[in-house]
Amino acid sequence: MPSYVVTGASRGIGLQFVRQLSADPSNTVFGLVRNKGTSQRLLALAHARSNVHVLEADVTDAARLRAAAAEVAKLTDGTLDCLVNNAAYVQETRRAYDLTTYSEKDEDDLLAADFDAAFRVNVLGVAYATNAFLPPLRAAASPFTSTTSASTAANPAKVITLSSGIGDVDLTRALRFAGQAAYCASKAAVNMLVAKYAARFAEEPLVFLALSPGLVDTSTRAPTPEELEFAVEFIERGKEVYPEWDGRPISPEVSVRAMLEVIGKVGREDSGAFVSHWGNKQWV
Ligand SMILES: NC(=O)c1ccc[n+]([C@@H]2O[C@H](COP(=O)([O-])OP(=O)(O)OC[C@H]3O[C@@H](n4cnc5c(N)ncnc54)[C@H](OP(=O)(O)O)[C@@H]3O)[C@@H](O)[C@H]2O)c1
């Protein structure tokens, strides 16, 4: 019975991961949310499907994550096949806030707050969650609990971390995209974190992958005029880099379907890589 943990499962891409994974009744899927009270759609899914479980954990709370891992292990014979580090602090699209405008407006505290939140959730939170779930992941991949040996295990345990194309240095240069600096820097940093875990566990049947979902519409409200202007400019630049692109964000359904295909195919030789939902460096 393959088991999955998805962080940030209250909405957006995380909720869609739980939805698609739990459509197969042989999967056991745990959605981690920081607040059950604001996770009605996930709770409704768990009510409708007995293979969906909801646990509360903020990814900045290492002790709570370890407690969640213990709860998962109780229901999975101590093993976990796949952790999806999806939760993120997504920096508001404040067009003005490229790195220089903070200092022009005497907003050093705001700059610090943005960096603190982005790195605490998107980098440290991934390390906390990964460390908390390593024992059941390693147990799933262990030669003593699996039927194959560590060196030949056909289905290594996987840690998939949602990154972003706008954390890619080459795309940033091509787009000339100066906005959302704290968020983008945190995604570039988490790519390195993923490579570090891959290096640490190179000898074990564990795969670590940084995965970008593409440009996905997970909005929960209509954009403000400023956000719309920002989005139009971003998309125009994107079309210069990718002339074949239609400029439309994809749905969470389409993104997660593509990512699950990539996740199904990745093997130990890919561990530590950063790829898109296409399984390569095409970011839209
Ligand atoms: N959408 C895109 O186009 C896009 C593009 C590139 C990369 N990504 C990445 O894909 C992932 C999902 O994106 P999304 O668009 O679905 O994001 P989203 O709609 O903003 O949802 C973010 C999720 O993370 C949770 N979260 C935030 N801080 C948390 C914390 N401290 N502890 C636990 N959970 C926390 C939120 O929970 P609450 O409901 O409690 O706030 C929510 O479930 C993120 O890693 C994002 O960076 C998205």
Image (cartoon, rainbow, N blue to C red):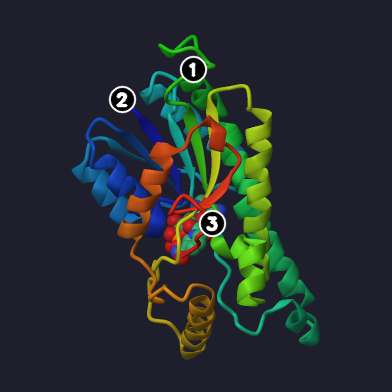
Q: Residue 101 vs residue 151: left or right?
A: right
Q: Nearer the viewer, mark 2 or mark 3?
A: 3
Q: Is residue 117 visible?
A: no
**Callout 1, which amino acid?**
Thr
Q: Is residue 29 above or below residue 103?
A: above
Q: Residue 227 vs residue 173: left or right?
A: left
How many circles with numbers are drawn on the protein?
A: 3
CB within 8 Å, label 2 to label 3: no
- The image shows residue 262 at horizontal and vertical percentages of 42, 45
> Which residue corresponds to mark 2?
1
Please report the residue visible at 50 percent of the width from the left and 88 percent of the height from the top. Answer: 229
- The image shows residue 6 at horizontal and vertical percentages of 43, 44
**Callout 2, which amino acid?**
Met
> Which residue corresponds to mark 1?
152
Q: In the structure shown, which secondary structural element does the residue marked by tag 3 occupy?
A: loop
**Callout 3, which amino acid?**
Lys
Q: Residue furthest front?
A: 244
User: Quick check: is the Cβ at mark 3 less than 8 Å away from ligand 1?
Assistant: no
Q: Residue furthest top?
A: 144
Please report the residue visible at 79 percent of the width from the left and 75 percent of the height from the top. Answer: 108
Task: Mark 3: give few (<14), some (14-19) or many (20+) Cα within 10 Å.
Answer: some
> Which residue corresponds to mark 3?
281
Image quarter of the N terminus: top left
Q: In the structure shown, which secondary structural element does the residue marked by tag 2 occupy?
A: loop
Q: Looking at the image, is mark 2 or mark 3 earlier in the sequence?
A: 2
Instruction: Judge by depth and name the residue closer to the eye, 80 or 260.
Output: 260
Q: In the structure shown, which secondary structural element does the residue marked by tag 1 occupy?
A: loop
Q: Looking at the image, is mark 1 or mark 2 earlier in the sequence?
A: 2
